[in-house]
Amino acid sequence: MEHSQNRAPIYEALVKYNENRVVPFDVPGHKHGKGNPMLTDFLGQTCMNVDVNSMKPLDNLCHPVSVIREAETLAAEAFGAGHCFFMVNGTTSSVQSMILSVCKEGDKIIIPRNVHRSAINALIISGVIPVYVSPGINRRLGIPLGMDLEDVKKAITENPDAKAVFVNNPTYYGICSNLKGIVEAAHEAGMKVLADEAHGTHLYFGENMPISAMAAGADMAAVSMHKTGGSLTQSSFLLVGKNAGISEGHVRSVINLTQTTSGSYLLLSSLDIARKYYATKGKELCAQVVESAEYARSEINKIGGYYAYSEELVNGRDIYAFDKTKLSIYTRDIGLAGIEVYDRLRDGYDIQMELGDIGNVLAIMSPGDRWKDIERLVSALSEIKRRFGRDSAGNVDHEYINPKIVLSPKAAFYGEQEVLPIMESAGRISCEFVMCYPPGIPIIAPGELLTEEILENIDYSKKRGCFMTGTEDMNIERIKVIKE
């Protein structure tokens, strides 16, 4: 296996294609960049040479039989999966393909409410009915946690006809659920387990990491290789477990319902190369990321006022394990909301964090981080505290709220609607999302009841400068609700 993982079939085929100096009378129309010199100057000649169309020597993503199929086989081996699909419509497409592969209209799925909008969008598309398991909440940090195994078992008992259990693992903030326990409970009840591992690439390659979905026996997993695995933005893997009993052909048919027929070879080759890199060097790469994150945590905690949290949060229930590569920092004790620290870092120090919410900022760590960059972040945080810190803002007063579900997401999205000013919509059923992005976890989603508490949360998030999205109204001042 070690020898085979040194291969990168898609990359190798593209190199050979380049060497053959093929004359293109096919799409794309930029013809190796000659048709768009400005873009070629910007992106580089190599990039334009390999932005090519599917053809016999390069295989076809919709129906792979040669180099893409070989690359899929190598990726499946690297991740311990039965099969691996190369996805070029983002992990959004991977998440939606998982749900559509095992559920059909009217089926139930057990799912935590703090999922990414892509999962709820899949329910709108498919007509699958969510049975929400409320995640735990850490009231001090104001973040949703994992799913408690006992809550999942209760949902399984109360909904024996559900087809699948969906798990976020890890969450944006590094929180992991008892994935192995959830898999065992679901399989005992005849249900599939689908894992959103958008932030979990490294779990497959690092030592002493929380368990990966494939190792835990999950049936399918969506792995966002571009987030921490080094592939290009929008590229992702969809894994099917060795013993899932889910046909590869069926999953490919589902993927082909929505995925482009013009798969980008820039994205495909980046997945191939990133898999090779992690399969051959992953242990050292992941150790390096953990070391960087642990060093940053210890230095940030020395500043005082900030709290960079780690596995001391683990309680064996809704925080079953912690992903130490995540650098989540609670900011309220210096008197600033996370989004305020996020803005100060970007505007005053040219440091771009992944997200700022009401209580926290999050830095995504990868093997690309340099020690001097980490020092710069620590130094900037220290200076922000000194220059802008106030008395403690106390515990988060608008933490994650578990909403009340009234209609299925599909029924609300396609229902008869009217538009109201958002702050006058209490007591009505929402037909739209409202969320801070990132992380893209909805404050309210279609089919849920708009309450005063939720409206206060939306208003507070807007006033603190969170980037709000989800409604047709770009200013998030009006919202579609079910007509009375």
Image (cartoon, rainbow, N blue to C red):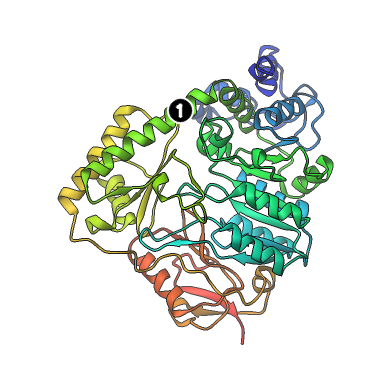
Q: Residue at x 55, y 82 (%)?
A: 428
Q: Residue at x 79, y 60 (%)?
A: 104
Q: Residue at x 46, y 53 (%)?
A: 315
The amino acid pointed to by label 1 is Ala
Please state if 177 lies on the left or on the right of 315 as rendered: right
Q: Position of residue 4 (x, y in %)?
A: 69, 17
Please state if 249 lies on the left or on the right of 219 as rendered: right
Q: Position of residue 369 (x, y in %)?
A: 39, 30
334 versus 415 height, above or below: above
Quickly name the residue at label 1: 287
452 versus 58 height, above or below: below
The answer to which of 348 and 153 lies nearer the viewer is 153
The answer to which of 188 and 331 lies nearer the viewer is 188
Q: Position of residue 237 (x, y in %)?
A: 65, 38
Q: Quadrant location of the N terminus?
A: top right
> Would you identify the image quadrant in which residue 461 lies?
bottom left
Q: Position of residue 189 (x, y in %)?
A: 76, 58
Is there any visible trace of residue 392 in the rendered image? yes
Q: Residue at x 81, y 40 (%)?
A: 248
Direction bottom: furthest residue: 484
Q: Quadrant location of the C terminus?
A: bottom right
The answer to which of 66 and 240 lies nearer the viewer is 240
Please state if 166 lies on the left or on the right of 136 as rendered: right
271 versus 162 height, above or below: above
Regarding mark 1 in the picture, which secondary structure is present there? Answer: helix
